[in-house]
Image (spheres, helix red, strand yellow):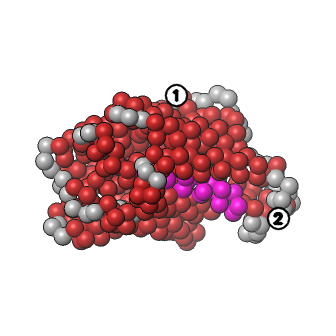
């Protein structure tokens, strides 16, 4: 028996999670816009700035699995409140840095805090949303994260121009603390614990049996994780490989985009505040389009494999088709247009990946999504370093070509290896 779609409380949960996703990208993208100012003030070169960018991503990648496991073990309410509060403090401390070592150190500590955010939020969404809405909620929440990256450049430029670059980090930290208070006061880990959730909405989230009784939640908190089973899972390794390529490409936009526009395309800082945000605005749309496309295909074909594979492959190859000309054209505005289209397609592949992590992860969805995100951010950690080295030795085109080659590989993994219908737990 199938319950009818009803109730609105779960959408308020999605709103809270989306606000948190926005804050994550606001906090991680702000330094890229400030980077030209910081580099000039402290005489920091391209390779050193690449290491500062990647310091965050290395810790973010390494602490994904511990963060996801803690979310599975202790629940999203306490974990998200704790980690958002911690990383907000680290954001504020960025203003006290005064050289390569101190900037890298505080960004590394900041990454530890953000590491658990998306996996723990995935756990929360799995608890609050039925499978038929998971593509949509992943698309909407990741759209909010890209919205944070989109609004970051113009906001940062205004703050730098009026208050100085250090106030960028103070203000972003305050926003995070406000979110912590709102989350802890209003969110509960289970719909069953929330008095404002009607029986009809609970039935829609959990499903009902033939007698109309609401089914119990299928996910329980687990203390012991089957590492051997997870490590033998072809599904999980394929998902990690595919997401590695997405992460590598995505961090080109998150780390080097403002500097690329200033130094190679010769934009003023004011123009950077406008044009550096355009790809992220396209990403806002791309994330939601990808999530809606997955749910639409799933409803019409009934095939988890087709729905997720098709959207992901089209997204990654579409990015390739746009990022290569972006690297090669002479006109700066044409390049920005191509990069904007490239990021739209790249983001279309995000919702399928996170929805698949929920499908194959089962009761360990926080940990499986953390492993996937760890792989993506290892790619993201390598990306700024490789970009900085290549630019240092004279090539602004090569970083984009390398990213395109990796995305072709990622599309091949989705098409021929990754099977979204095979659980990482049950079948190994």
Residue lying at the far front in this picture: please name it.
162
Whole-angstrom CA distance, mark 1 to mark 2, is: 40 Å
Residue interval drawn in magenta:
11-29
- State the residue position of label 2: 200
Closer to the camera in the image, 272 or 387: 272
| Mark 2 surroundings within 10 Å by alpha-carbon count, few (fewer than 14), some (14 through 19), many (20 or more) | some
Residue 73 colored in magenta in the image: no
Q: Which mark is residue 399?
A: none
Vertical placement of residue 308 versus 238, above or below? below
Q: Which mark is residue 228?
A: 1
Closer to the camera in the image, 398 or 333: 333
Q: Residue at x 56, y 46 (%)?
A: 173
Question: How many numbered discs sit on the rendered protein?
Answer: 2
Q: Is residue 191 among the parts visible in the rendering?
A: yes
Q: Residue at x 63, y 46 (%)?
A: 177
Question: Would you say 239 lies left or right of 226 here?
Answer: left
Residue lying at the far left in this picture: please name it.
394
Name which of mark 1 and mark 2 comes first in the sequence.
2
Instruction: Locate residue 174, reporting x and y percent.
Output: 60, 48
Q: Is residue 416 among the parts visible in the rendering?
A: no
Instruction: Locate residue 367, reporting x and y percent.
Output: 56, 38
Q: Quadrant of the N terminus?
A: bottom right
Foreground label between 1 and 2 = 2
Instruction: Locate residue 146, reporting x and y percent.
Output: 47, 59
- Residue 347: image quadrant is bottom left
Vertical placement of residue 368 versus 353, above or below? above
| Mark 1 surroundings within 10 Å by alpha-carbon count, few (fewer than 14), some (14 through 19), many (20 or more) | few
Residue 13 colored in magenta in the image: yes
Vertical placement of residue 271 versus 426, above or below? below
Per the image, label 2 sits on a secondary structure element best described as helix
Instruction: Locate residue 185, reporting x and y percent.
Output: 76, 49
């Amino acid at each position: 028996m199938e319950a009818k779609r009803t109730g609105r409380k779960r959408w308020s949960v999605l709103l809270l999670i989306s606000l948190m996703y926005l804050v994550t990208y606001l906090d991680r993208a702000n330094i890229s816009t400030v980077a030209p100012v910081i580099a000039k003030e402290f005489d920091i070169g391209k390779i050193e700035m690449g290491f500062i960018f990647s310091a965050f991503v290395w810790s973010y990648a390494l602490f994904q699995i511990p963060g996801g496991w803690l979310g599975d073990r202790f629940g999203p309410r306490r974990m998200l409140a704790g980690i958002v509060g911690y990383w907000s403090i680290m954001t504020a401390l960025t203003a006290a840095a005064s050289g390569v070592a101190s900037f890298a150190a505080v960004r590394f500590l900041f990454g530890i805090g953000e590491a658990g955010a998306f996996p723990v939020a995935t756990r929360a969404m799995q608890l609050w949303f039925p499978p038929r809405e998971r593509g949509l909620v992943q698309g909407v929440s990741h759209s909010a994260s890209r919205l944070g990256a989109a609004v970051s450049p113009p906001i940062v430029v205004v703050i730098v121009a009026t208050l100085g670059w250090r106030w960028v980090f103070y203000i972003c930290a305050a926003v995070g603390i406000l979110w912590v208070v709102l989350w802890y006061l209003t969110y509960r880990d289970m719909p069953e614990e929330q008095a404002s959730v009607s029986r009809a909405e609970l039935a829609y989230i959990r499903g009902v049996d033939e007698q109309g009784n609401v089914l119990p939640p299928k996910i329980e908190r687990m203390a012991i994780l089957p590492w051997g089973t997870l490590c033998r899972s072809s599904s999980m390794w394929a998902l990690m490989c595919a997401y590695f390529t997405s992460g590598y490409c995505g961090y080109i936009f998150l780390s080097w985009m403002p500097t690329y526009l200033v130094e190679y395309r010769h934009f003023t800082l004011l123009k950077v505040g406008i044009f550096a945000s355009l790809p992220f605005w396209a990403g806002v749309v791309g994330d939601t389009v990808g999530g809606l496309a997955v749910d639409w295909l799933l409803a019409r074909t009934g095939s988890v494999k087709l729905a997720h594979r098709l959207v992901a492959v089209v997204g990654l190859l579409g990015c390739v088709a746009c990022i290569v000309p972006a690297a090669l054209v002479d006109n700066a505005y044409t390049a920005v247009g191509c990069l904007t289209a490239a990021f739209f397609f790249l983001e279309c592949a995000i919702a399928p990946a996170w929805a698949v992590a929920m499908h194959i992860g089962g009761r360990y969805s926080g940990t499986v999504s953390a492993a996937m995100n760890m792989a993506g951010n290892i790619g993201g950690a390598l990306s700024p370093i490789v970009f900085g080295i290549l630019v240092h030795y004279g090539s602004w085109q090569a970083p984009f070509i390398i990213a395109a080659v990796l995305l072709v590989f990622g599309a091949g993994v989705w098409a021929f290896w990754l099977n979204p219908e095979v659980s990482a737990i049950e079948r190994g």
